[in-house]
Amino acid sequence: MSDDESDQSRGGWLRQIGMSLAGPPRDRDELVEVLAEAQENQLLDVDALWMMQGVLRVSEQQVRDIMIPRSQMVVIESDAELAEVRAAAAESGHSRFPIIGESRDEVVGILLAKDLLGVESRDGAPFRLQEVVRPAVYVPESKRVNVLLKEFKASRNHMAVVVDEYGGVAGLVTIEDALEQIVGEIDDEYDEAEGANILRQEKNRYQLHALTPVDEFNRYFGTDFSDDEFDTVGGLVMHEFGHMPGRGETTIIDRFQFNVQRADSRRIHLFQMTVLPEAPE
């Protein structure tokens, strides 16, 4: 045996002794270090490491960390006409909607867009939204995300209304919101078909992809933001934050309020943007 082979043999033997003495990871931080080392040794690829870390994160996260805030919910009023309901579904691109009574604190049920199919064929009877609304599921803000995922799987529900400690509506959460903490942003078939960087949801409220070019934003809203330093709106807004923002963080640039809807540790994916009233001269 050559000296090099002998050194490698001793090195491998010493590493095995060290691992046996150290034992398994004693806490989550050590486990993350082991996974990172496995990726460095090419036992895992980057995406697999990211998902494993995501699985560990959801066991620590609470629903309040991933929910869509109450102010950003796309809702339908319980007395809405059929044409209004279909228009809201078409504009937002969502497949599920909270149905509210007099205020957003009164969620009377959940509407699945597919339940509107064939509604007009019911012997010409007037449309009543209550007939197609399904019961709402409620979860507390403090519920762990991994527990929420188990409940979604068991109940086959995909959306839940989030309530605070006083019983008021704090927001809503979907199974997609929870899964994205593990696998990253999920684009559905509507996202691909729509293909739009800027999607109007309500008056003065828009869904905006972070990769929207600054010059496209300028053309759409008649603004003159410079694209010399930042090519995308996401870069412009992140510069305004001064850090990598998390979901739910908000900042205002000029007369535009940007609320982060989707983001991970690497970049922002999606904004909810509100055009604020112009200040009087």
Image (cartoon, rainbow, N blue to C red):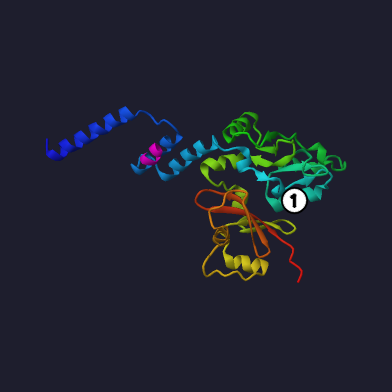
Residue at 75% x, 35% y is: 134
Identity of the amino acid at label 1?
A: Ala
The answer to whether 17 is drawn above or below residue 89 in the figure is: above
Residue 215 x %, y %: 59, 68
What residue is shown at x 60% (from left), y 37% (from top)?
A: 62
Q: Where the N terminus falls, by quadrant? A: top left
* Of the pair 46 and 84, the residue shown nearer to us: 46
The count of marks equals: 1
Give the residues drawn in magenta, as a range.
Answer: 33-37
Question: Looking at the image, which is closer to me, 161 or 34?
Answer: 34
In the image, residue 19 lies in the stretch drawn in magenta: no
**Residue at 41% in and 35% down:** 30
Q: Does residue 166 sit above or below 91 in this rendering? A: above
Quarter of the rendering containing residue 166: top right
Q: Is residue 276 above or below residue 102?
A: below
Q: Which residue is mark 1?
A: 88
SS at mark 1 in the image: helix
Q: Main secondary structure of the magenta part?
A: helix
Left or right: 238 as drawn, with respect to 49: right
Residue depicted at x 61% and y 59%:
197
Measured from the top left, where is residue 231 in percent x and y? 53, 65
16 vs 97, left or right, is left
Q: Find residue 198 and report its horizontal and vertical position in percent.
A: 64, 59
Quarter of the image for residue 164 reads top right
Would you say residue 117 is visible in this rendering?
Answer: no
Residue at the outermost right position: 125
Q: Quadrant of the C terminus?
A: bottom right
Q: Label 1 crowding class (10 Å Cα cut-off): few <14, some 14-19, many 20+?
A: some
